Image: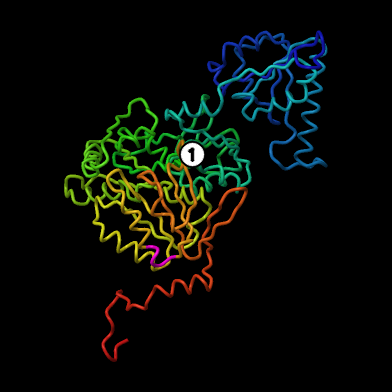
Amino acid sequence: MSAGASKGAGQITGVGVGPGDPELVTVLAARLITAADVIAYHCAAHGRSIARGAAVPYLRAEQTEEVLRYPVTTEVSEHPGGYDGAMAEFYAEAAERLARHLRDGRDVVVLCEGDPSLYGSYLHLHERLGGQFQSVIVPGVSSVSAAAAATAVPLVQHDQTLTVLPGTLPDGELRARLTGTDAIAVLKLGRTFGKVRAALEDAGLLDRALYVEHAGRDGERIEPLAGVDPAGVPYMSLALVPGGYRQTAKPGVVIVGLGPGDPAWLTPEAEAAIAGATDLVGYRPYLARVPVRPGQQRHASGNTVEAERSALALDLAAGGGRVAVVSSGDPGVFAMAAAVLEQAVTGGERWAGVPVTVLPGVTAAQAVAARAGAPLGHDYCVLSLSDRLKPWPVIADRVEHAAAADLVLALYNPASRSRTWQLAAVADLILRHRSPATPVVIGRGVGRDGERLQVITLEELGAADVDMSTLVIVGSSATQVAERDGRPVVFTPRHYGEEGAAASSRHLRPRRSRARPPAPDGGS
């Protein structure tokens, strides 16, 4: 019994009767409807009730019926308190009508279309009467579930997310909530249909959106939302955007960035592509970061077989597979995107018809920079110190030119088991152009268990403990270190003051642009 409930009083129960089909009423709901002394239901001025229609087979002739007729069905009202005032007065009067039955010991069932807890009008009565009488909510098949079943398209699968929204939300909030989710249901259309349609179109979801009206009842209507005439849309209809990437995705290769390691840094777009793949291809440690899903094939390989891995992915897609090639960080930064595209382009007719899509990810440079503050706040250069695919003289030349240009340097692959001397050599090259006190950030395993972040100086860089899981950021002449909340914060100001400009000018000499040859005498 609810706190404060009257002894000997009746019980009020909000019963979900589903979308309107009597056969979708649960066994418990049917039993309670039949046993109730009083049946209450909401309706508009016309007196028709979808909820009562679903409950008809379970009603008894001797039951008392309370018709709770809404005073208004739009947000326009002549009531002194406006729409909110009119509705508050209505619910207060309705609650008192039902309270009289409850005080006399009669059990009251309030019929609710769909599920009472999903925008159900019963909740207004539950809030007003729950503290006085024993009150119960019985779930029902929701309009969202009924609509999804009617479309015969899976709404969400595996770890996809579903967002349920009322179309009556303010336009800005509605648009904001359409992002970052896999599947969407927008209820309460009617006069909001135009606004909802425009928001879905701007979010790039209109081609996936379905319109469902009278799901589970006579007159059921399902069609692509893009072609629906707004003039004929009733309030009790909804827009559905299934999260069925698996159903809409076509054969092809999608190259996905997992981010540095923290699952929270995986983008929803990349997550959907992984979930929708028939085959996952990647370096063994990266594939281990992806949850195992039933029905997916995993093709793991070693660290130095990018070309073979790319060819396998393209072959699988050519055979009808939806292939996700996974990379750490961003696939376009020292990762698999370039390898797959190179194979696709040079493979001639073999893979001519295979679509290749690259999805971005959070890079290691971004992750380390964010942990340190904002060392990449101005112009910067990204370099890999690995000489496996390019010779050391090329690396040294690029490092020196970037240092001379006074760019912040983000250095990937600073050392490996067999390659231990390059970092000290790089530090010496940079010291030709930078102060020994230049701030340096060293991040190892950022976004993973055991991550480590250090702030040292350029003078100390040559002896730093680094490996292939480490990223090094060397500041420019403008980069600063400050103490904040007991830790060092590194940032490079977006402005370039006189000191930074002077430092840069000492290293740069004017060069003739190579964009085009000089014009002959008399030319322009």
Q: Position of residue 347 (x, y in %)?
A: 18, 48
Q: Which residues are magenta?
A: 430-434
Q: Is residue 429 left or right of residue 388?
A: right
Of 271 and 287, which appears nearest the observer? 287
Quick one: SS at disc 1?
Answer: helix
* Residue 433: in magenta span: yes
Q: Position of residue 170 (x, y in %)?
A: 63, 46
Q: Main secondary structure of the magenta part?
A: loop
Q: Is residue 359 above or below residue 41?
A: below
Picture quadrant where residue 163 is located: top right
Q: Position of residue 518 (x, y in %)?
A: 28, 82
Which residue is drawn at the image coordinates 39% and 74% (left, top)?
508
Of 114 and 429, which appears nearest the observer? 429
For the N terminus, the quadrant is: top right
Mark 1 crowd level (few <14, some 14–19, many ≥20, 10 Å Cα): few
Which residue is drawn at the image coordinates 39% and 51% (left, top)?
463
Q: Which residue is mark 1?
A: 264
What amino acid is at disc 1? Ala
For the C terminus, the quadrant is: bottom left
